[in-house]
Amino acid sequence: MKEKINVGILGATGMVGQNFIRLLEDHPWFNIRFLAASERSAGKSYREAVEGRWHMDGDIPESAGDLRVDRVGDLEKAAGVCSLVFSALSMDKASIRDLENRYAAAGLTVVSNNSAHRNSPDVPILIPEINGNHLDIAESQRQRAGRQGGLIIVKPNCSVQSYITPLYAVMAAGYRVDRVLATTLQAVSGAGYPGVPSYDCIDNVYALSDEEAKFEREHRKIFGQVSDGVIRNDESVTVSAHCNRVPVIHGHTACVSVGFAGKKPSKEEIIRIWNEFRGEPQERNLPSAPAQPVVYREEKDRPQPRLDRDNQNGMGVTTGRLRDCPILDYKFTGLCHNTVRGAAGGALLMAELIAARMNPDL
Amino acid sequence: MKEKINVGILGATGMVGQNFIRLLEDHPWFNIRFLAASERSAGKSYREAVEGRWHMDGDIPESAGDLRVDRVGDLEKAAGVCSLVFSALSMDKASIRDLENRYAAAGLTVVSNNSAHRNSPDVPILIPEINGNHLDIAESQRQRAGRQGGLIIVKPNCSVQSYITPLYAVMAAGYRVDRVLATTLQAVSGAGYPGVPSYDCIDNVYALSDEEAKFEREHRKIFGQVSDGVIRNDESVTVSAHCNRVPVIHGHTACVSVGFAGKKPSKEEIIRIWNEFRGEPQERNLPSAPAQPVVYREEKDRPQPRLDRDNQNGMGVTTGRLRDCPILDYKFTGLCHNTVRGAAGGALLMAELIAARMNPDL
Amino acid sequence: MKEKINVGILGATGMVGQNFIRLLEDHPWFNIRFLAASERSAGKSYREAVEGRWHMDGDIPESAGDLRVDRVGDLEKAAGVCSLVFSALSMDKASIRDLENRYAAAGLTVVSNNSAHRNSPDVPILIPEINGNHLDIAESQRQRAGRQGGLIIVKPNCSVQSYITPLYAVMAAGYRVDRVLATTLQAVSGAGYPGVPSYDCIDNVYALSDEEAKFEREHRKIFGQVSDGVIRNDESVTVSAHCNRVPVIHGHTACVSVGFAGKKPSKEEIIRIWNEFRGEPQERNLPSAPAQPVVYREEKDRPQPRLDRDNQNGMGVTTGRLRDCPILDYKFTGLCHNTVRGAAGGALLMAELIAARMNPDL
Amino acid sequence: MKEKINVGILGATGMVGQNFIRLLEDHPWFNIRFLAASERSAGKSYREAVEGRWHMDGDIPESAGDLRVDRVGDLEKAAGVCSLVFSALSMDKASIRDLENRYAAAGLTVVSNNSAHRNSPDVPILIPEINGNHLDIAESQRQRAGRQGGLIIVKPNCSVQSYITPLYAVMAAGYRVDRVLATTLQAVSGAGYPGVPSYDCIDNVYALSDEEAKFEREHRKIFGQVSDGVIRNDESVTVSAHCNRVPVIHGHTACVSVGFAGKKPSKEEIIRIWNEFRGEPQERNLPSAPAQPVVYREEKDRPQPRLDRDNQNGMGVTTGRLRDCPILDYKFTGLCHNTVRGAAGGALLMAELIAARMNPDL
């Protein structure tokens, strides 16, 4: 790449924002030029703004630490210095949607870690290994909004990422899955910071009742098809979820039963499909792409969050325990790193995919 | 009760044995007269024998502390001083089966916390609220073994107790459940002591792959019928399980989806059935019986192990979150205290049921 | 007691307020008649007000659940129905001080769980076993404030309670301690709710730097003397503290080294002093008083928070591990339940002491 | 380095052994040629031998996985293929001492992670930044044992490493510390695997009473002087310890108060001394040496185990919170990674120091 692409981060001081800072350090394609946060942080250096609340391992990267933090409303400045922003805003949804729209209207690509736009029919929920073709909607989205350049894409809920790529791999190999019953054991970092009170999470687990509806719905759009300028949901897979919080720092685990419509693959075939599955990020060799998106482990007690969340720098999904299910067809366990693959890392991969599609020389 | 029934505890120094000691303190019907453990403890006072490894809250009960510990092989002594023993032996299964048989042959009722006899066709796996009628097998069991007096009964695996009584209550109300898909989040005390290494359980969860087969099978015998001197399994309910260990001290949680064959009750009816369910222990007003075996909580994030495990001194099952399941019919969460209801407390209730059936004046 | 004393709770919906509700259920002397909280809860029943945020084990007590919640500013109402309020307010210190002053001015005794008045020279920091005589300041406090009836007393920081009663017991036996070096391992419930983020407390410990100054200072007032209408600090004991948060729900542990000036007792004598120590609450047999305020355990690895925090319903202090210190004279470990003895339970005992002193017939 | 040095690992299948395997992968100087374990593992490939009990993050290194495991008694084989062994044996101390002696007698350098030889007067307890000069004892040790080549060195108890290098740095700068009072908060991995039962460590902390004597004694030998063929203890620093286990996976924290004899440095000077301290490993630029052995963090709540244990790949000590102590002179907190710097990583650095001293061209 001749010249790096300048990017910004909206909501740079929160936990997801910090993860973006960390992952973009020394990125081969992207260069941070704009950091925005709330009034409280505006005008400070990033280092000052996160003083006493830097939650990543290791220190604040030097280059980002010296940057001056702007207000999230300073979109003219953003538009002047960069062409893409990562959105990790923490506000009410209507305000986020409005701000993201305004950044897009200013011509910036908006790669959002937020859920505000997940229901917008022309905004893709992107998993680069699965539905990169949803980027075909770009032109329709721009036309409808009456803007140029700006495109909004969002990442899915972190909880679905433990099972959706493994599921897709099997479907892409020609098998029709029609039922999924999943129970999640989700890490506390999924709730951001301060997030989950210790009082709720020591010697305890509890239900995440509000996550279940999202979990049961989001795959429909991801598996959908672009048609007439909108994304038409795929209704072929029915999902039922039991979502739980457990005392784990990072790593969402999903215990999944799947049922097939029609011919079902053997267990050996599924394992082979998983280990051999490659998507567009792998074909394009994107900088943040895991070499092997789904890794199957043979041990009878894996995956485990502490041992497997960092699989391929936290960008791989680990599966294991594939076995017969007496109710549906098969059971397995899936795991992914919720704040890397499931949040900032996943969003970064989305941005890399857009950049690669737009710049064939990358 | 005119005179207390003298009882013994086999394996009195382990974690389950200690729970028996604790629960039998000041018991209105039972009186501890015999404590047996391994060679290492034999000859010591119970207090000395558990010094440095007493794991219960509070102190060693005075009366038990002063008892002298015998060898588990001293069954003549046991037979001389008591008529019932609780078995919390920790040995290989064949040795446990053999020892329990010998205690029974010596005329003692054996209420076992062990799994050794769970597959013996004439040994009931008893949940007093469900299958007290399996005690009808007593005469056949004695005849087959050629013994008098002695009867062996066992308690089920602790993991099934979070869901099986709620399930039974609905079935007893006339509805046919035919499919259950459950994911468990099980506490570390289920593995005894030392049990689960901290290294596996801090910031982590892991699969209990060996529990799943038991979980999928055990209800068949509990729901079975005594016929021709054996317990014939009920095969009408198919169960699929995902079993997990989580960093919780006490309290097994089960996330359950159920499917009905034929007519299904409304959610309101199920909740009513649960809250109104009463079994033989309640009718007989047994000392350890919870007044309400199944308690439904309305909050959207209950049950939780730390908040609900002590429901009715740890003897009640707590349910919650009853909602529609897109795959089967309904979803709910069940919880029970694994070392009380699921182990020593459950066994004690079994013994009380036997005592009450044999002594109608109790 | 002929008639119960009517009491109120300010800040009734928070964690400490909930603990007051729980501890006052069926209290032999006190009767809850007034519950106050913020605007958000005002007008609701207590049950509605804490829906979804009741953090105590077990359910909301029936009687309190039906009470209507008032605004904390409704002191006329409070003054009309009760004579004593427990303050568990959660606001800035100046506002708390002001509100507590106004309740006192309205003639109510204010027993405060807050720190706002800890530095007021005529407000006792009370530990009933230690400095009940500080209540002699009552008249001076009223005169200075120009009010009648109302008296304000506060409870000490929860962290000091793991060691200060054991220390006092030895001092009261005639030995002069002049140096204390303590490291605390404090439970998360000490920070209230939501309090400590799980993200900070799973697989981690961290310093409580702001607690150390309080820890090093508070004993001076508690050990002080009432003179000329103020409490004169005792400066004879120098304390140095390292304060830490650990992943424990309840129970503050302190690892303490002590040095004596002049004659020092033997270890046997200290243990005897601790086990035999009794204070005014024990002499007066107050309802919440532990029978034995300090219990010494002989095991080499006790006290432990999970095993010992509930010593005497959480009102006793447990000590252990008394041994020689190569730097000062002795080392020991102390533990108390931070939300019972260290907060609501301690405040309740303070109120009982006042009630008993004022009503000799109790 | 022209040719790599061939090394072996005794006790290769345990937790410390696995850490050696992990740290020696792709080591620039050392090449694993010999792996020994108990009878149970002998004859298997290393991969088979640790199947189901590999506790490191990531997978078993390919090269080591294919090696065949020998018996720990096969010292002729070891002597034939390597010149240095790392000892991570798990047996009684007398057997370890005997085996290590026999390996040394066979001409092998023994770098031991065990405590068996810590009291042998001619065996150095080595911290390469502190007492590399203790290697001068090599000739005396060989003579006394009547052997050639073989030299035994041991690493200190993991608990002291959180504070001893910072302490030494200040002493090496010319200040006389004479008193240290430390309370440790130690991670569970310090107990190996299975090690600490979860039952003891969830919602709990407990005392490590047996560690305290070691903690109070070990610095004397490390700070000692080689004289007349033995290491003479330095008695100038008196240490008092309170040792505790906390629910943390890796990272031992020490809360330390220090007192000086004579002139004491300012806080600024101590911080400067720590940050600038370099030892022989840094001068020789050893492969595993941290660039900065002691890193001082300015934040008021650091170090924290989860955030700071991986400082410089787990080989650095992190200090923080330097402040005045009302009892001694200063207080600070120190932290080190107990299984890296405090165990296998520390031992590897010892081996590198020996190799560098013997091969000046390295």
Image (cartoon, coloured by chain):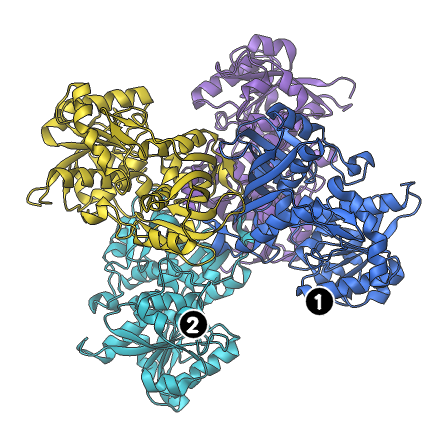
Chain colours: A cyan, B purple, C blue, D yellow
Residue B145 percent location from the top left of the image: 53, 15
Point out which mark residue B202 bears: none
Say which of C118 and D243 sits in front.
Answer: C118
Residue B62 percent location from the top left of the image: 67, 21
Say which of D14 and B183 sits in front.
Answer: D14
**Position of B74 relative to B14 (above/below):** above
Q: Secondary structure at mark 2?
A: loop
Q: Quadrant of the N terminus of chain C?
A: top right
Q: From this viewpoint, which residue is outermost toward the left?
A: D2
Which residue type does callout 1 highlight?
Ser
Which residue type does callout 2 highlight?
Ala
The residue singled out by tag 1 in the image is C95
The residue singled out by tag 2 in the image is A88
Q: How many marks?
A: 2
Residue A195 percent location from the top left of the image: 51, 61
Residue A24 percent location from the top left of the image: 31, 69
**C-beta proximity under 8 Å, tags 1 and 2:** no
- Residue at the (89%, 46%) spot, across then down: C358
Q: Few, some or many C-alpha atoms within 10 Å of disc 1 (few <14, some 14-19, many ≥20)? A: few
- Residue at the (23%, 22%) spot, across then down: D99
